[in-house]
Amino acid sequence: MRTCIQVTGDGDWDTTVAYVQEAERLGVDVCWVAEAWGSDAVTPLAFLAASTERILLGSGIAQVGTRSAALIAMTALTMQRVSHGRFLLGLGASGPQVMEGLHGVEFAKPRSRLADVLDVLELASAGEKITADSDTLTLPLPGGGGKSLRLSQGSPDVPIPVYIASMSPRMLELTGARAQGWIGTSFIPEGADDAYFAHLRRGAASAGRTLADIDLCQGAEVAFGDDLAAMAAERKAGLAFSLGGMGSADTNFYNQAYGRQGYADVAAEAQRLWVTGDRTGAAAIIPDEMVLGTTLIGPEEHVVARLRAWKDAGINSIRLYPAGDSWDERLATLARALELIEALA
């Protein structure tokens, strides 16, 4: 499996850069930079391109809807140039809480909007004039003074791999049909086929592809310790936040994803408790097995068994979120995890 880390531009930036550089030295293949409601993804990536030599650099994810389709294409081509071909374009629709609450952009037709971005990126990468005529994008605007333009950068020397962060069935189908990679989350390998892979396969088949044509990239916290029950208990509050707080009461893709993996009743009740203000209760109803299914925590032999389950499920790339109270502790956890993954090969 290809190994990845994920960082943000928040916090002490010099320490973050040193962490990424050490991860590169340890052999990590990809560094994803997150974009939620803190830092943007692209500015840190540009800095890291100048501060590293080998590691691939991906936007994990750039939010569709906060930028025009053409600007996303311009940014992707620029990043591919300044990183000397090491850039991965990770895209996602985010959700109504961030789009409408933070950016003032209506969360409408996210699948069509993302497809428009892919169309524009293809035209821009081919050096073609950029045009669009869909239900979410028209280029150039009719009746005005604009005309179709091609980007002055020209085609990239190295094609830009596109990764889509998706959880809903229709967005997963788009990922299967058009992306080079899938950025997933809320993943339990034992329940992933119906929840994720069936939709990815359906989309891939519609484009004459198979699941083998897609880099399946999943992430999980990794931590080592002997008391598995205590470690699971410590993480229930975070999972309750995903089930109840990552989105609105009507639209929570994380909640829905866990529901499709066999935890519909738990997900629904945790959300109900969360939105009524009982966050302690929301965490308390989450079973240990749910936490352990979606993380890589516990004694070393347990972590190895879970890594093997991820690999057997078909995961090609694994994003590691190493636990630790300091960057040094996180690096030690990361190094240990990398050794275990290498031994699985």
Image (cartoon, rainbow, N blue to C red):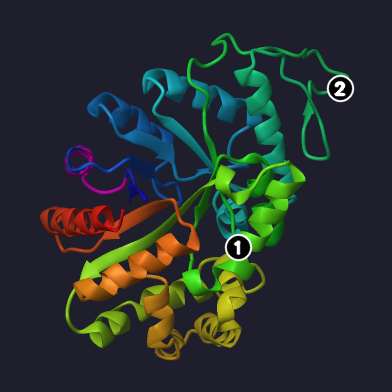
Residue 308 place in picture, x, y as percent: 36, 65
| Within-10-Å neighbours for mark 1: few <14, some 14–19, many 20+ | many
Q: Which residue is mark 2?
A: 142
Name the kind of residue labelled 1 in the image. Tyr
Is 322 placed above or below 120 here? below
Name the kind of residue labelled 2 in the image. Pro
Quick check: is 20 in the magenta stretch?
yes
Choose between 334 and 251: the one closer to the eye: 334
Q: In this view of the protein, can residue 269 be seen by the observer? A: yes
Determine whether the residue tagged by mark 1 lies in a helix, strand or loop.
Answer: helix
Helix, strand or loop: magenta stretch: helix
Is 61 placed above or below 134 here? below
Residue 159 place in picture, x, y as percent: 52, 24
User: In the visual, does 132 lie left or right of 254?
Assistant: right
User: In the visual, does 176 lie left or right of 243?
Assistant: right
Choose between 133 and 173: the one closer to the eye: 173
Q: Which mark is residue 196?
A: 1
Is 122 placed above or below 6 here? above
Q: In this view of the protein, can residue 105 be seen by the observer? A: no
Identify the residue at image location x=41%, y=68%.
Answer: 309
- Residue interval drawn in magenta: 10-24
